[in-house]
Image (tube, rainbow, N blue to C red):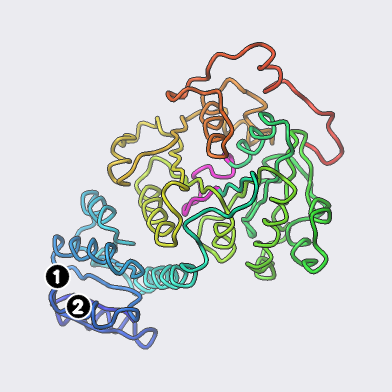
Amino acid sequence: MIVLADSDPRFQTRVAEHIGRRSELLVVDGGPELEKVLQDKAGRIDVVLLGPNFGLEDAFRIARQIQATTQDISVLLIASAVTAEVLQQALRSGIRDVLPATFTGAQLLEAIGRAEALTTQIRGAAETIRSKPPEKSDSKVITVFSSKGGCGKSFVASNLAVALAQKTGEKVAMIDLDLQFGDLAIMLQLFPARTIFDAAQNLDRLDEEALQGYMTPHRSNVMLLAAPLEPGIEETISADAVTRIVGLARNVFRYVVIDCPPSFTDHVLAALDVSDECILMTSMDVPSIKNMKLSLQTLQLLGFGRDRIRLVLNRADSRVGLTVQAVEKTLGTNVDVSVPSSRDVSVSINRGSPLIIDNPKSPVVASILRMMEFAGVKSGVAADGEPQRVTEAAKGGLFKRRAKPGRSEA
């Protein structure tokens, strides 16, 4: 059910014409009536649309109230003027999206579709994601996620996996869960013969030993379970297959790093369900920060405690009119790791070689090393991001160890 709150009959008619029979629509004129509907229709409402005649202050107050009580309802705001201040207040109030009053029918339906899908996912997964991490010896599963592409999650995931392998001397599993556009194989300059698709199709015969046969080794001691080589076959991989694959991986490897697509798919929810930590990434632009806030709220609604969510701000030193302090104020919480900008990142990606191997003294690498602490591994990096002094022997052990490259290695 969609509830529209706006006092203008013409606007009510306009929205109703766009929605048509797509969803059940209930129209109310003001705040008191909306609050009564929220109480009477609890559990049936998916989306609340706050119209341009509702009043911004009332809209922000109602949105905060919904987030504090109902939680699984997505609130959309339709504003007369979409300014930076309106967007900022909307973010802080838990509003999922903001549309201009001049919206088109396609824009409205797309926003409602996203909101309804999110509500469905939250309700469907709320009982499966637990507030405590899975009890499993000393293995660690770390999921790297961002609800917006281009935030650097694949770069962080690949370099973090290599860092863990270098620091601990153990093999590290990396799973590319972006089943449609996964890039980890390209970023590591690997040519996988088998992928997660092959593992999922043979689930009935899959065990720890067989799983390793579907993985491609990298010279850094990282084993990659690559994304499918062909697009459009992700639907043949079930969420249950992801759960089993990650479970087998953590039985074999002490550390498992998962790179996710930029959306809360069933596969992502399955991975989160068996993860110990979630690295939630954003970059220094308003859309990315908005998505991070919504992702943070969604994870917490799903029972993923804040103590298991690690906020990483990429390109944190970019001069784009935002500061780290402003981002933290908008998010309502502290950023755990700030990653500086560097042209070396693009160079390493284009070369297909992790930056931690190419340039271990880079300030970006220092930030990656700090993320190892999420897995309980000491980073050797001070709180201010500067690498602590180490001995020459330690340097050799951490950065200079090389394995002879094999046929499938980078």
User: Mark 2 highlights which residue?
Assistant: 11
Give the quadrant of the N terminus.
Answer: bottom left
Query: Which residue occupies the extreme right position in the image?
Result: 407
Mark 2 packing: few (<14 Cα in 10 Å), some, or many (20+)? some
- State the separation of the CA atoms marked 2 and 1: 9 Å
Residue visible at 58% across and 62% down in the picture:
270
- Between disc 2 and disc 1, whose residue precedes? 2
Compared to 54, does 189 lie above or below? above
Residue nearest the viewer, comparing 301 with 330:
301
User: Hey, which quadrant is residue 31 in on the image?
Assistant: bottom left
Compared to 334, does 102 lie above or below? below
Q: Identity of the amino acid at label 1? A: Asn
User: Mark 1 highlights which residue?
Assistant: 53
Query: What's the magenta region?
Result: 144-156
Residue 89 falls left or right of residue 188: left
Q: Is mark 1 on a helix, strand or loop?
A: loop
Callouts 2 and 1 close, C-beta under 8 Å: yes
Residue nearest the viewer, comparing 182 with 310:
310
Residue nearest the viewer, comparing 163 with 52:
163
Residue 155 is inside the magenta segment: yes
- Location of residue 84 in the rendering, given as x and y in whole percent from the top left corner: 24, 49
Label annotation for residue 147? none
- Location of residue 261 in the rendering, given as x and y in whole percent from the top left corner: 56, 55
Q: Is mark 2 on a helix, strand or loop?
A: helix
Residue visible at 35% across and 31% down in the picture:
319
